Amino acid sequence: MVNFLQAFWQATRPRTYPLAVAGIIVANALAYSRIGSFETKNWQIFLLSLWVALGLQILSNLANDYGDGIRGTDAHRLDRQTAQGTINPKTLKKLIISWALFIFGCGIGLLWLSFNSLTDFFTFLALGIIAIIAAVTYTMGKNPYGYNAKGEIAVFLFFGLVNVLGGVYLQTQFIRVMDIIAAVVIGLLCTCVLMINNMRDFDTDTGAGKNTLATTLGKESMSHLYRFMLLGAYFLLITFVTLRQNFYLLSLLALVSPIAKHLKVVRHYSDENIPSNALAPELAKIVLITLATSILMSLSILIFNYKKLI
């Protein structure tokens, strides 16, 4: 039982959890700055939003472990439970279905708590169903979109736009242009995480016939796109700073050095001076950069709002 629980825990891929919460943190900072304070109900919505977002991330990771495992794509990965036989595929499939139903129930509770309008309730219910389907079909099913170079699109939409804009709307029932800019920033950064993951797996995915954006574009073009999206996210942050005149956001300058070092390694990858698997440490770095950006954004928004009130 202990071994099974350990294998299940590993299959949920805890290192990816920051991606799930990054958008929700920013969304609620934006909502807090608009409302002025959170009452008990607002805190309940915030915490339940975090849980549902995290639950969807776990669902996606379990489905990914199963889908890549039964296809043999992860045969070389010692940290993949289906591929290594530490979890029976049939057992994992049942767990995926059970977890999906559990998160669906949590989502209904979140919507019931957030909305009085049936239109809003059913609109977000439809979004929730689509999110669950997207989480599962990334690598599961007869035609998983993760094998057709569409994973990055899904990450941008759900981790960026849906997480941030949905999180703001749950609290305030309206969205502003600044919210959209923030959502695009988080979406781009989360997309960069998947991009660096697929760049790392370039050789093994090519051998397994997995058609990702990286294998489609090739190392050089993928690296150029990666740099464009990562730097584009911070260009939008500069726009955010300027429009809000919130210069506390300049605290993000603390990330300049880690980002520059990260991009230097990506350049070596592009020039084929290092093998694809040498990007493994960079995956952890871009996850931390994304989390740090979301936290610094959120703190800056909250401090700016506090200074305006006193």
Image: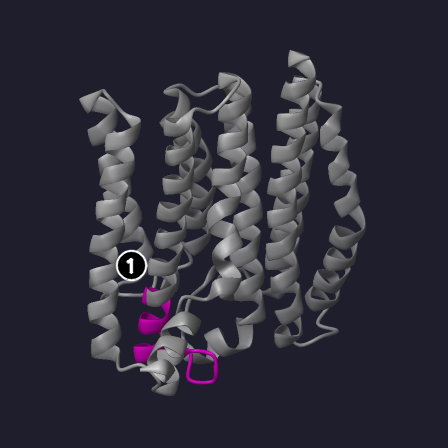
Q: Which quadrant, please, contains the C terminus?
A: top right
Residue 217 forms part of the magenta stretch: no
Few, some or many residues within 10 Å of mark 1 (<14, 14–19, 20+): many
Q: Amino acid at mark 1?
A: Val
Q: Is residue 190 left or right of residue 86?
A: right
User: Is 257 rendered above or below residue 71?
Assistant: above
Mark 1 secondary-structure assignment? helix
Residue 77 lies in magenta, yes or no? yes
Q: Which residue does the image show at 36% across and 20% down from the upper left?
A: 173
In the displayed structure, would residue 81 be above or below residue 299?
below
**Can residue 187 be seen in this snapshot?**
no
Q: Is residue 143 left or right of residue 240?
A: left
Inspect this view and state whether residue 250 appears.
yes
Question: What residue range appears in magenta?
Answer: 63-80
Total numbered labels:
1
Please tell me which residue lies in front, 278 or 209: 278
Report the colour scheme.
Answer: one colour
Q: Quadrant of residue 268?
A: bottom right
In this orientation, which residue lies closer to the viewer: 283 or 15? 15
- The answer to which quarter of the image holds residue 140 is bottom left
| x and y percentages locating residue 129 in the rendered image | 23, 44
Residue 5 x/y as whole percent: 36, 76
- Where is mark 1, residue-wise? 136
Question: Horizontal placement of 270 versus 105: left or right?
Answer: right
The residue at the point 32 percent across, 65 percent down is 63
Front residue of this view, candidates 290 and 3: 3
- Residue 304 horizontal/vertical position (percent): 67, 22
Farthest residue to the front: give it: 40
